[in-house]
Image (tube, rainbow, N blue to C red):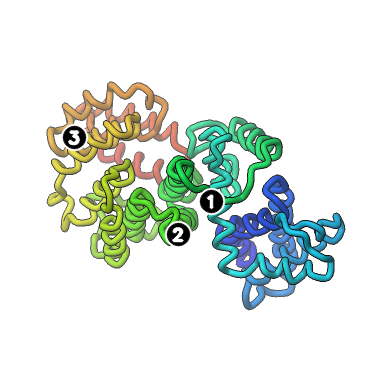
Amino acid sequence: MSDSNQLVAHLFRHEAGRMVSVLATMLGFDRIELAEDIVQDAMVQALRSWPFQGIPEHPSAWLYRVAKNKALDVIRREKLFRQISGELILESQVEQQVERFFEEEEVIDSQLRMLFACCHPSLPFESQVALCLKILCGLNAREIANAFLTNEETIAKRLYRAKEKIRSSEIRLEVPTGPQLPVRVAAVLKSIYLLFNEGYNSSHPNTLIRQDLCEEAMRLGFLLTQNPQTTTPAAHALLALMCFQVARFDARMNADGGIILVKDQDRTKWNRALITRGKQQLSQSAEGSELTEYHLEAIIALQHCMAPTYAATRWTDILWYYDLLLLRKPSPVVALNRAVALAEVEGPKEALRAVLKIIELASNQYYHAILGDFYAQLHQTDLARQHYNQAIHLTSSSAEKLLLQKKIGQLP
């Protein structure tokens, strides 16, 4: 039963967005909640039957078949066969037409259309991103709230208002053209970026890295780069960034689930094939004159990947790229990351001054953990311990708590 439950959870993350996109294309974007309900019903049916009847040979195909049959039931019951996806369909043709929607090429196109529909300009930007994360990527309200540094109630209200706007504005599932396209691509890329961040450093208390979320983000990024309309330099840069970060996954945790810091990681475990792929994507992102935050973050990640040892890392270059990034994307998180590079170049005292100015992050665990590091390097043990304890209080991650406790234990 445990195996089947884990498989259903895995498939939900990987297939739910694809299935909802197809069903919404077929039934209409204004009936997105019906599409989500059909997918949920298919997943529940799997949870009920697989533990007793066994996991089917092709689990994904099984789910698609169940969802397709449930959609057919809805169409016949509600007499929707007269009009499916804007086309007049005879009742005798309905099964053949529904089958067409589930062909692989149509599934891919449906996801792309869904991405851009969720990022319609009539929706507030935060709602656009939340819809993408909820509908296409299967994140729950808590995970989305973590990505936005807000609470679940706010996200629930945001999603509700967005879906009401979809109905009232009759937003269509389509990839835009002309001057609308760049604005919509920016919103789509931001959604993918936030999804990847949630996987890379998860809000889940017992799971620091959620590779399924990172894989889903990479899949959506790849989807954009493969379409002639959306294969922008920024899309390639974001995909490059994700490749560089994922390449280091196997070295980030020890056998007991403990965090291994970059300076202590076994670099032979870094995935060189992914690093090479990231370089290829970064090269493609250089076409044209566009320089985005994704380009700069990818270049910073590449500097780490290229360094044979931690000591050989080109910190001066990284600091320079962070300065550029802070100009392009002024945010307290970027400023905090820049301070880490500043410590390597100019020492902990200068870095400490920089961090103490970032008062917006005073309730953030990483702010206090980094302050603890700098105070420890300056031999101010009491202040280091104070900030490490504050970070422990603020984080929900078991792995982060253990790392911080280890640092406290190493203080003199």
Image coordinates of residue 231 in percent, x first then y, are 40, 55
Q: Amino acid at mark 3?
A: Leu
Label number found at residue 293? none
Look at mark 3 in the image and give the residue it sits on.
342
Q: Amino acid at mark 2?
A: Asn
Number of labels in the image equals: 3
Q: Nearer the viewer, residue 139 or 325?
A: 325
| Vertical comparison of 378 with 9: above or below | above
Label number found at residue 227? 2
Q: Quadrant where the N terminus lies?
A: bottom right
Tag 3 secondary structure: helix
Please tell me in which quadrant of the rendered image residue 58 appears: bottom right
Image coordinates of residue 75 in percent, x first then y, are 81, 59
Q: Nearer the viewer, residue 95 or 210?
A: 95
Label number found at residue 175? 1
Q: Residues within 10 Å of mark 3 (few under 14, many from 20)?
A: many
